[in-house]
Structure formats: structure tokens, C-alpha cells
Amino acid sequence: MTEPNQRQTNWQIKTDTTKVKQILDDLRPDMLKRYEAAVASLCEMETKARQTLNAAGVHTIFYVAYLLV
């Protein structure tokens, strides 16, 4: 088991906000690309679902139940 001072030092190193910010800044471009791809896919799926529901004559008030599934 580590000493209390060593645990505190380790915790301070792990939670150093400048390091965390640097890591997140490095990860952000790829995170943004994945988010944009997911949103584009979601919007495409919603559009297709709305078109299908509209063609089937489903009232718009019921769309939410279909889109949440």
C-alpha cells in the first residue's frame, strides 16, 4: 500500500487540469468527426422514417413513438 503523501501526489498528477485539457484538445478533432458522422446518420434515418410514416398515412403526432424505438 502506498503512503498517503504518494497517493495525494498521484491524485494531483492525474487531475492536473492543464494535462487534462491538453489531452482533450488532442482528442477533440476525432471526437468531432465521430459526432458529425453520428448526427448525419441519425438525421438520414429520421428522414427515411418520416417519409415511410408519411407514406403509410401515420399522423405526425405518432412519429415520436416510432423515432424513439
Image (cartoon, grey):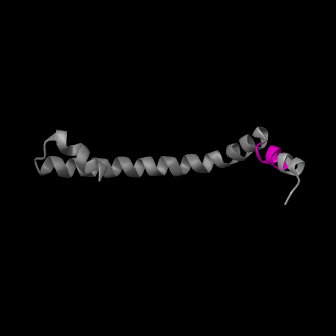
Question: In the drawing, does residue 58 fall left or right of residue 41?
Answer: left
Q: Please indicate whether residue 54 sits to the left or right of residue 43 in the image.
A: left
Horizontally, is 37 left or right of 51 in the view? right
Give the residue displayed 55% in from the left and 49% down from the top. Answer: 33
Taking the magenta stretch, the answer to whether it contains residue 12 is yes
Q: Is residue 53 magenta?
A: no
Give the farthest residue toward the bottom: 1
Asked whether 8 or 27 is in front, the reply is 8
**Where is 25 relative to 38, above or below?**
above
From the viewer's side, name the closer residue of 64 and 41: 64
Q: Residue at x 86, y 49 (%)?
A: 4
Q: Position of residue 18 (x, y in %)?
A: 78, 39
Q: Residue at x 12, y 51 (%)?
A: 56
Q: Position of residue 34 (x, y in %)?
A: 53, 52
Magenta extent: 10-15
**Where the N terminus falls, by quadrant?**
bottom right
Q: Residue furthest left?
A: 57
Give the x, y percent position of residue 62: 18, 43
- Look at 40% across and 52% down and name the residue there: 41
Query: What main secondary structure does the magenta stretch of the protein show?
Result: helix
- Label count reads 0
Q: Position of residue 60 (x, y in %)?
A: 17, 40
Look at the picture and state if 16 lies above or below 45.
above
